[in-house]
Structure formats: C-alpha cells, structure tokens
Image (cartoon, grey):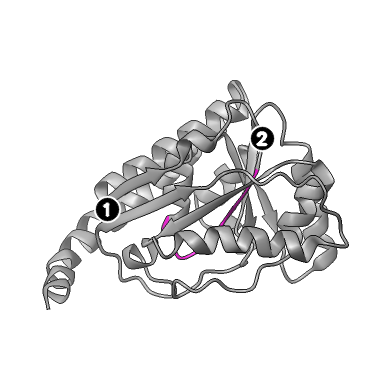
Amino acid sequence: MRRKLLFVLYQPYKWLFFAPFLALNTIFFGVMAVIVSTLINQRIGSYFGGVLWSRLNALFTPMLVKVEGKNHIEKNASYIVIANHQSYFDIFLIYGWLGLDIKWVMKKELAKIPGIGFGSKKVGHIFIDRSNTRAAMESLSEAKKKLVNGTSVVIFPEGTRSKTNNLLPFKRGAFKLALELNLPILPVTVLNTKNILPTGTINLMPGSVKMIIHKPINIQGYTELNMPELMQNVRSVIESGLTD
C-alpha cells in the first residue's frame, strides 16, 4: 500500500521534471563527451559523458547507491567486467560507481538513443549486433584494441535484462574475449535496479540499489575446451551476491 501511494505521488515529478531533465542532460553530456573526447582524449570524455551523467541522474531519481568490494580492484589493471543485467539503471550504477575507465559492449539498438548513441561511439564504446554472429565477433575484436592502460570493458553476458533475481543463460562472447586477451574477469553483482526501473516498463521509482564487486577471476588454465567451467564459475560468483 505504501509503495502504491509513493508511486502515485511520484508521477508528477517523473513526468514534469525528471523525464525532460534526463532527456536534456543526456544530450548535453553526450555533446560534452564528443567535444572532450575529440579535443583531449576519450578517457576524460568518458568521465564527462558517463560518470558525471550517471551520478547526476541517479541523484535526481533519486537512487541511493551502496558499493561493496572496491578493494578488489587493482589500480591500472584492465578487466573484463561481467555483470548481471536487471534494468537500464544498471548503466548509471556501474558507470557512475565502479571506479574504472570503462568501455561498454552494448546492443546496437542503444545506438539509436539521442545523446547516448552518438556520444558513446565517440568515447569508444562498442555496439554489438546480437542477431549476426560474425558481426558480433568483429565487434568484440574491436574491443581488444581499447583494453590497455587500465581501461576495462563491461559486458552483460545474459544479453538482455532479467525481470527477476534469477540469472538468464550466459552467452560465450565475454568469456571468449577474456581468453583471447588473457585478461582477468571482474564479476559484479547488481542488486535492486529492477525496482528503480523494471524491464519493459516506464514505472520509474526512487529507491536504493547495491553493487558488489567480487574478487577478480584469473583465467589462467582455461581454454576453449573448458570454457563452460569458467562460465559456470563466474555465474556462481555473481549469483552468490543476489542472495545478499
């Protein structure tokens, strides 16, 4: 009953303030990301167009954030960051609070979103066509060139958003990339973003979320032959955080 009342009271704020605010600042930060990436470098551009953008929109949602496990990240190390996917607000949470210079492997549909699409391309993010295996692998190959000097890539191996706390089947692309680049995997568990913006809806609500950064998983000893074992290992670690 309390949540229903809060939902009703929140609607004027969502439609009269937050929705237009999100649209305008997304365009603004997208332009800033392009300018800074072009004139200075992509890392600083990504900070303007990603970290600041994410934190600002989380503040005005409002979305309260708690992070555990930041001590597991080694300075200047590059990772294949693998996280579960519950909501579009996962992007705000990970981008704003992970504390790494990151590139995203994003589904191609997001390239059409004003500000996000154009700005993301300019700061070096990678869009993937999941319907075309060859094109998907070419996109992942492009990612190899970017993962240097502490820059990491974030991939949602489920490929789409889960409507519950249950993980969907993992796709192999992220793990194949980790093996090819010989980079450790950084498992991340995202909690409660589905309560902020449930998948397939526009029922935005304020709330609290949590991100658990687990210990990196060394991929030494894994090959194409035992990749399913690696996938299950990572899945189990991420899943363990969902019961937190």
Q: Distance between the residues labelled 1 and 2?
A: 31 Å
Task: Name the element at disc 1.
Answer: loop
Specify the quadrant of the image occupied by residue 75.
top right
Q: Which amino acid does label 2 sit on?
A: Ser
Residue 238 image point, x, y percent: 54, 59
Q: Residue 240 carries which label?
A: none
- Left or right: residue 241 versus residue 82 is left
Among all residues in the image, which is located at the extreme top?
40
What type is the residue that disc 1 sits on? Thr
Q: Is residue 139 shown left or right of residue 11?
A: right
98, above or below 222, in the image: above
Q: Is residue 82 magenta?
A: yes
Q: Quadrant of residue 153?
A: top right
Q: Quadrant of residue 3?
A: bottom left
- Specify few, some or many for label 1: CA neighbours under 10 Å numbering under 14, 14-19, or 20 or more: some
Q: How crowded is mark 2: few (under 14 residues within 10 Å), some or many (20 or more)?
A: many
Residue position for label 1: 61
**Where is the N terminus found, in terms of image quarters?**
bottom left
Residue 204 appears in the rendering: yes
Q: Residue at x 80, y 41 (%)?
A: 182
